[in-house]
Image (tube, rainbow, N blue to C red):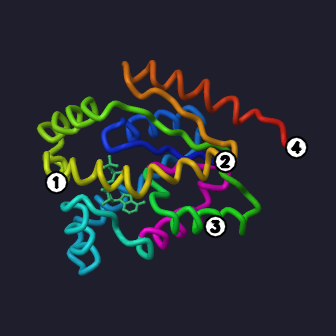
Amino acid sequence: MRFLIMGPPGAGKGTQAKLIGEHYDIPAISTGDIFRAMQTSNTPLAQQVREIMAAGGYVSDEITNAIVAERLSALDCDPGFLLDGYPRTPQQVETLDDLLAERERVVDAVISLLADEDEVVARLLKRAEIDGRVDDNEETIRVRQHVYAEQTEPLLEVYRHRGVLVEVDGLGPIDEVSQRLFAALDVHVNKPVV
Ligand code: ADP
């Protein structure tokens, strides 16, 4: 099982990614979490990542692809994985395809978690009060929404053409959304190989 979860900032990807990982017993890998963890060190790279994230931009493909390549080569990814927040650019789609091709694998399903823009902004502002994430202020949230719409949303079409896109409504209680996701993903997990 090799799944991706995509959606605008605030759609609930991180929350649902963890639940999907537990349900299918595969690691849920979030590039955002990896970058946030990196920020605690005091290296030039950590400093660079911190500045990019605080401004709401994307970390370079070079850095992001290298980090994902290393993570996917870990043993726990052999049975499958769910990537949360990757790929976000055409270059990242290409790198992921190459990484999977080396292992004679493909992406089985790509979740597009749908959410209304006003609702996601409201969620992120609420999260700002609780978690204190540096990129959860109104200005950066607007930048992140824009960057997502410009750079990442068009990638959904790539996966739609491959017949692996699964669109799921992200509004409603957390467990209702996960039930919708499991039902949609099961179809792809059990799909016969042709
Ligand atoms: P969200 O999408 O909800 O804003 P994430 O935790 O997925 O939150 O990402 C937070 C930030 O981490 C992004 O705004 C970006 O700066 C960086 N980031 C995460 N994944 C990637 C990626 N695949 N490519 C480039 N930058 C990324």
Residue 152 on image: x %, y %? 44, 54
Residue at (33, 30) in percent of width and height: 116
Horizontally, is 104 left or right of 98 in the view?
right
Q: Which residue has dot 3 on it?
A: 99
Amino acid under label 4?
Val
Q: Amino acid at mark 3?
A: Leu
Earlier in the chain: of badge 2 and badge 4, it is 2
Where does residue 101 sit, x and y in percent of width and height? Answer: 72, 65
Dot 2: within a 10 Å radius of its alpha carbon, few (fewer than 14), some, or many (20 or more) residues?
Answer: few
Residue 74 falls within the magenta-colored stretch: yes
Which of 1 and 79 lies nearest the eye of the viewer? 1
| Magenta range | 64-84
Judging by the rendered image, the residue that carries numbered circle 1 is 134
Mark earlier in primary sequence (1, 3): 3
Q: CA distance from mark 1 to mark 2?
A: 36 Å
Query: Is there a contact, CB below 8 Å, between mark 1 and mark 4?
Result: no
* Mark 1–mark 4 distance (CA, rounded to whole Å): 47 Å
Query: Which of the four quarters of the rendered structure image does ligand 1 lie in?
Result: bottom left
Toward the right, the furthest residue is 194
The numbered mark, 3 or 4, whose residue comes first in the sequence reads: 3
* Residue at the disc numbered 2: 161
The reply, left or right, for residue 21 in relation to residue 53 is: right
Image marks 2 and 4: residues in contact by CB distance under 8 Å? no
Tag 2–tag 3 contact (CB < 8 Å): no
Looking at the figure, which quarter contains the C terminus? top right
The residue that label 4 is drawn on is 194
Locate residue 61: give its quadrant.
bottom left
